[in-house]
Amino acid sequence: MRRVLKVVTWVAVLLMGMLALLTGWFLTLPTLPSDVYDVLGSPSVDGLYAASADSAQAWAQAVARDLGLPSVSLAVGVDGEVVWALAFGLADIDDGIGASVNTPYRIGSVSKAVTSVGLGRLVQDGRIDLDAHVRTYVPTFPEKRWPVPVRLLAGHMGGVRHYTSGFGRTFLKETFNRERYDSVIDALEIFEDDPLLYEPGTGFQYSTHGYTLLSAVLESAAGQAYLAFMDQAVFAPLGMERTGPDDGTATDPLPAVPLHMDKLIVPLLVQLGIPAKLLGTRYVRPPDADPSYKWAGAGLLSTASDLVRMANALMSYEFLDSATVELLWAPQRLRDGYMNPQRYGMGWRIDREAELLGLADSVRVIHHGGSSPGGSAFLLLVPEADVAVAVLTNVNHLSQPGPMRLAAYRIAGEFVRAREQIE
């Protein structure tokens, strides 16, 4: 009898805990205003692309509403101009602050594409030899079993590891790092003593740490800190006024507040028989973290318009010459002659696409996605049509191959088709 009472007590405690959990869930469930997906005012757009903009806007708002995204910002470039920029939703749910086209977002690994432009600048100026070894520029980096050429490092073929997986101390440090690194060289201590995963050129391992090492190469060649170099040599010349480090200094306007969609409790409650549509969308703030260990690979803030300005400059060959741009956009082959699995160049993925763009014939597309705690981004270029699209939101895990990627392709297709009709 005593055993039965003990079991009943534990069941009662469990049920009370579940009731408290459900009560807490619904009491703290953020409620987005019904008009959160309305755009205040009419975004300006060239009359030639008005129909494309209307179609893209309606579709983007529908997707955001279906997914329960707090905010979305996007921009489109055609023939070297930002012809359309749009933002809707709340950049800050708690204070009800609306998103604007000037609101910066975390762009995650799209930072790698931005960094590649700085690399191209130094290569074009003759200050970096892509076939030189990393230790030529960063002699403090420990000598490895094989030398690491800069070209392969920039293409994730240098053997440098990515973040540690699992849930150990190293994983937590690399995912939610709270240590402030005063320099890129200091940040190398996270991985510099680890052996290479393979002989450079014989394998592929996507690596944000590899881009931290690449930023140390840029620092050495430029003779100044990575962030200072990028601001002076890339952001300022390209008019990227709201692009910079996610270090808490951006204030005009404040960056979008980073959020997580709760991915644990919703599936649990659904398994208990509660219809998903009754749960709504729950957001939680990601743990505070300091991205100073990964500026170049995943630590930047930007706006959709700034990213499109950069893309426009690359497609026009005005900032970097055609030879340099095509060098960055050339997918690298492994030593055995096979293409690397992501068709990665240096800071960019390169594909041919027709279906996702809604086109009859395939065209070359250059792209990069990014996801970081509280941010998703996707940047897409269609050089042959001179069209670029950037899509951003302040929720993570939506960049690739998720909704941000599909949105960028859908919107790009609208403008590519419109441009073809105009011609």
Image (spheres, grey):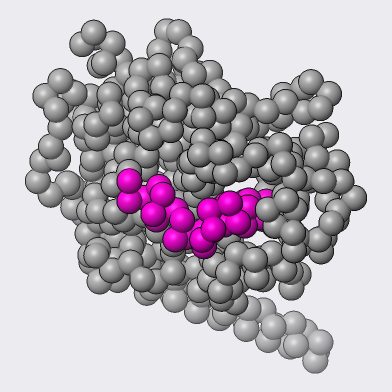
Q: Position of residue 396 (x, y in %)?
A: 48, 54
Q: Nearer the viewer, residue 220 or 304?
A: 220
Residue 265 magenta-drawn? Answer: no
Q: Residue at x 28, y 47 (%)?
A: 239
Can the viewer see residue 42 in this picture?
yes
Q: Position of residue 414 (x, y in %)?
A: 30, 22
Left or right of 400? Residue 304 is left
Quarter of image, res 407: top left
Against 254, is 349 above or below? Answer: above
Quarter of image, res 5: bottom right
- The residues colored magenta run 208-237
Q: Nearer the viewer, residue 125 or 328?
A: 125
Tell me the quarter of the image containing the C terminus.
top left
Residue 217 magenta-drawn? Answer: yes
Q: Residue at x 74, y 73 (%)?
A: 169
Question: Which residue of the protein is positioned furthest toward the front in this rendering?
Answer: 126
Q: Position of residue 51 (x, y in %)?
A: 17, 23
Left or right of 293? Residue 206 is right
Q: Position of residue 13 (x, y in %)?
A: 62, 83
